[in-house]
Amino acid sequence: MDITSDTHSQHISRQFNQELEELKTHLMAMGGLVEKQVQDAVFALLEGDSHLAEKVRDNDRQVNDLQLQIDDECTRVLARRQPAASDLRLVLAVIRATSDLERIGDEASKIARNAMLLSESNGNVRGLVEVRHISEHVRKMLRDALTAFARFDTELAMQVVREDELVDDEYGSAMRSLMTFMMEDSRSISSVLSIMWVLRALERVGDHANNLAEYVVYLVKGLDIRHSDPDKLDQEVLKKS
């Protein structure tokens, strides 16, 4: 059975309703923090702001703590309520989502570390245009994936899944361009390698946002779409009941 945002407010136990709602609320709070971490890390890189980059790295502990808190809440719900059907899918989806959000936080920390290294370099840094472009793309994917989770919106989730292939193409193109530039100018190797690590981190953010979107489909439709062709899934996802 498909679920909507109202499905989890229909239990006899008001406490159970509150526990499930708190899981979603805390997940969205963690998502908001991680989204800001990525935004700040990229801004620190583009603006050469080493202090902001250091702050991003320090804040990674908050992301880790939130994951532990939410996982503990999910464990208590499973033990006390023994949820079934859509309720069980919600708890499992939250557990999976916190893992991906924590890893996005790790990627933001990697970007911040490279931002600190690049802030110490002299001269122009090649690849910042690509960083700006891909970062905007994956941040929108992350924002849309979180919105889809909050609204149980499978249509928006499928848009995120399709966007992941475009990010992969942009990433491949940027890496080829930087490889060519690095071979032509050996003096740029150090800075270009740092930018490559940043682009890799951003590509991984897109992958994790894609995972979040897949969990939405699982949550709402009970359909596991991992390792599936998104072009062949749209109609199946929208029609399955």
Image (spheres, helix red, strand yellow):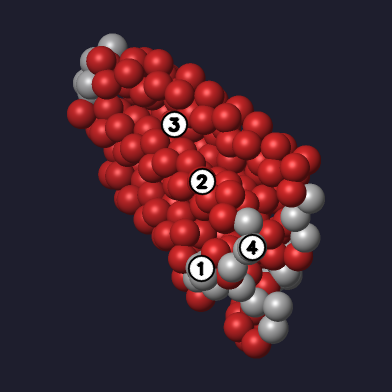
Give the residue pinned by disc 3.
108
Q: Could you tell me the amino acid type at mark 3?
A: Ala
Number of marks in picture: 4
Give the camera-side residue of 42 and 150.
Answer: 150
Alpha-carbon distance for marks 3 and 4? Answer: 42 Å
Nearer to us: label 1 or label 3: 1
Locate residue 163, reporting x and y percent. 49, 64
- Relative to 152, say whether 21 is above or below: above
Q: In the visual, does 165 lie left or right of 79?
A: left
Nearer to us: label 4 or label 2: 4
**Contact flag, marks 4 and 1 (Cβ < 8 Å):** no
Please tell me which of labels 3 and 2 falls first in the chain: 2
At horizontal 40% and vertical 21% (from top left) the residue drawn is 59
Alpha-carbon distance for marks 4 and 2? Answer: 17 Å
Alpha-carbon distance for marks 1 and 2? Answer: 14 Å
Locate residue 175, reporting x and y percent. 48, 43
Q: Could you tell me the amino acid type at mark 1?
A: Ser
- Relative to 38, say whether 168 is above or below: below
Q: Kindly state the secondary structure of the residue where label 4 is placed.
A: loop
- Relative to 207, say whether 145 is above or below: below
Per the rendering, the mark at residue 12 is 4
Q: Kindly state the secondary structure of the residue where label 3 is placed.
A: helix
Q: In the visual, does 241 lie left or right of 208?
A: right
- Relative to 102, say whether 61 is above or below: above
**Which quarter shows the N terminus?**
bottom right
Locate residue 217, reporting x and y percent. 63, 67
Give the residue pinned by disc 1.
5
Please tell me which of labels 3 and 4 falls first in the chain: 4
